[in-house]
Structure formats: structure tokens, C-alpha cells
Amino acid sequence: MTFFKYFLLPFSWLYDLVTRLRNYLYDIGHKKSFQFDSVVISVGNLNVGGSGKTPMIEYLINLLSSQYKVATLSRGYGRKTRGFHIATEEDNARTIGDEPYQLFRKFGNKIIVAVGEERALAIPTILNEHPEVQIILMDDAFQHRTVVPQFSILVTDYAKPFYKDFLLPFGRLREARRGAARANLIVVSKCIELSSKDEDQIRSSLNQLVGPKPVFFTETKFQVPTPIAHTNSISSDVVLVSAIAKNASFEHEASKLFQVKQHFRFPDHHAYSAEEIETIHSAADAHQVTSILTTEKDMVKLIAKPLFDSVKKKNWFYLPIRTSFIKNGSEFDAIVRHLVIDKLKELTGATENAKTLS
């Protein structure tokens, strides 16, 4: 930590004051919050970027969508549009954002994918246009207090847990650590070689801060590299390309499988240009590398027109990932399933009572 960074401390104190006041106004009801006639599950974090929220959303989709009609709702960060929108076949990463489009491309019509800055307005619109929706998964919504979820999952990165971080701009926290108390359950993501001692220490730190809550641990499983626009096999030497919050972790994992000759790192949610793609291709030629490897999140941006015309000139691959519970995954599944069953029963009972009274 550089000495200059300590000059940012007063701004963090000011930020703390503002966010604490905002949360207090919601807590006392001065700022309005809303609940809806569906099961709303929030997945979020306290840190800025890269904790594994979207892989957790994917896990929940796989867990629930075979029994229930599921919708996802996010802001659609990085998109070139504004307002509420439900994804269709005409959309791409530019119109709805890279992570929502990743979900739409992966799950298709199995779920409803929606984006909207105002969550409290977006949810009733989803339910009006798709009354069959039973569960809404809100991505990156822990600080969106206008909506009261039935259940809130807080995701924190094993390498940089929120209880070791500090408020913006001194650190990377969006609100004070005590805000984690609003979560019903905490998932420590991207665990690497988690020992029983590490697990006990993390649980102890979390319990001291927010009291006893269910705590689970997950790891990121990298899948087989998948070609983007060809059927060739990937080479042993690769050039990496990533525009994610934590580029270093992607390079670390890729280096286990390949010889990485160069890594083009871009900011999270970066919008690629055709000129940048050509620069990457030139670098690959200079290294005599035939394969370019990127992330699944980046892939959904690279396949959009007109960028895809440049990408398909070379052998691009993406590396899919999957969230896996290290242990007690069945306990996590049971908690979520029981929540959904109980809440849907409550909603059904309330509807029947309303019909009887009318």
C-alpha cells in the first residue's frame, strides 16, 4: 500500500457517512422499499467487481429452473442502451450487457433475462409481461435497497474477503462491512486449497462481524476450451485476452494448461474495437501462436457484429467456468429449495385469501 493512498482516507470516511445515512433511512422506512408477489433472491457483494456473482446466478438457475419459471434481473452494466428490456434473439452484449447476454445465450428460452436500472420498476414489469415467473434472481443487487428480497446471498472472494477490505476510495468496499448483516447466507467464492484451519478462521471472522449465519465455500472449475468460430484444436502456446475484474486469476489458471506468451488485459466490461482485435492478431503472429484464449464473459462481446468479422479471422477460444461447492453443497441446495417452497406457499395462500375476501 503506497503512502499516497492514505490521503484517500478522508474521502472514505465521507463515503461511509453517506452510505450509512442512506442505509439508516431505509432501515427506518423513510426511504421506501417494496416486496413483490414472487420469490426474489438477491445475489450481491460488498466489494467492487469480480467476486463471482454471475457464476452463482448460473448455479441457482441450474438448481431451480427445472421446477420453476425463473427470471434474472440485472442493471446490464456496460450496455449501450438504457431502461427496462427483456432479452430476445435480436439482442447482444451491446444491447443488454455482457453478463446478461451470457446468461441468455447459455440458457435461452429456459429463463427470462431482463435488464433495468430501476429494479423496483423492473420487477412488476417482468411479472406483468410474464405472469408465469415464480422466481426472480437479482444479480449484483445487495445495495439496491428499494427492493426487499425474500432471501439475500452475499458472495465474497476468498483472496480478498470483505472483512479485510476498506471503503472506497481507500479500499474496494461499496458500503461498510457491517452491511453484510443483511445477508441471509454468505458464500466464500474462488477458494484455492482451502484447509480446515482456513475454513474455521473465515467462519470465525464472519461470525464476529455479522453474527452466526450459514457460510459456504465454492471453487471455480474451468471447463474445456471451446472454439468460437472454427473447429480447430487449441495449441499449447496461447495469447490471452481478458476484460474482467481480476485478470490475474484468469492468467493463473490458464498458465496451468498452456504456455502464455502474452496477456492483453482490459478493464472490466471493456467494449472491444476492431482495431484492438487486429492488434491482438498481430501480437499472436509475432509470437508464432495460432490460438487466442479469452473468457466466456468476453466471448459474448466478441461474437457480436461487426466485431465478429475480425475475430473469425483467427483461432479464438473461450474458457467456460462453473461454480462448485467444496462441501455441503447439498445443504445449500436444501436451504434455497425450502425457501422457495415456503415462500411460494405463502404467496399462493395470500392469493387464495384475497379471492375469498373478494
Image (cartoon, grey):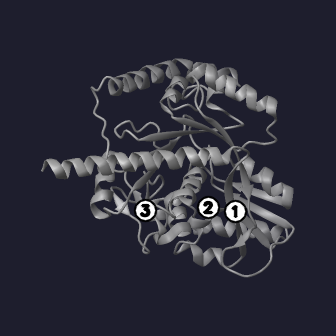
Q: Amino acid at mark 2?
A: Asp
Name the residue rendered at 42%, 54% in the picture: 135
Q: Amino acid at mark 1?
A: Thr
Can residue 259 be seen here? The reply is: no
Mark closest to the chain's N terminus, 3 or 2: 3
For mark 3, what is the residue?
69
Image check: 129 left or right of 357? right
Q: In the depicted view, which residue is nearer to us: 243 or 180?
A: 180
Q: Amino acid at mark 3?
A: Lys
Q: Where residue 325 sits: x, y (%)?
A: 69, 48
The reply to whether dot 3 and dot 2 touch (C-beta < 8 Å) is no
Determine crowd level at label 3: few under 14, some 14-19, many 20+ residues with C-alpha closer than 10 A: some
Can residue 158 be seen here? The reply is: yes
The residues tagged by marks 3 and 2 sit, at their Cα atoms, a distance apart of 28 Å
Q: Is residue 293 above or below residue 210?
A: below
For mark 2, what is the residue?
298
Dot 3: element: loop
Q: Residue furthest bottom?
A: 231
Dot 1: element: strand
**Which of label 3 and label 2 is nearer to you?**
3
Q: Where residue 190 sits: x, y (%)?
A: 70, 44
Q: Where residue 226 sits: x, y (%)?
A: 71, 71
Place residue 342 in its image quadrant: top left
Determine crowd level at label 2: few under 14, some 14-19, many 20+ residues with C-alpha closer than 10 A: many
For mark 1, what is the residue?
294
The residues tagged by marks 3 and 1 sit, at their Cα atoms, a distance apart of 32 Å
The residues tagged by marks 1 and 2 sit, at their Cα atoms, a distance apart of 6 Å
Q: Where residue 60 sits: x, y (%)?
A: 55, 54
Mark closest to the chain's N terminus, 3 or 1: 3
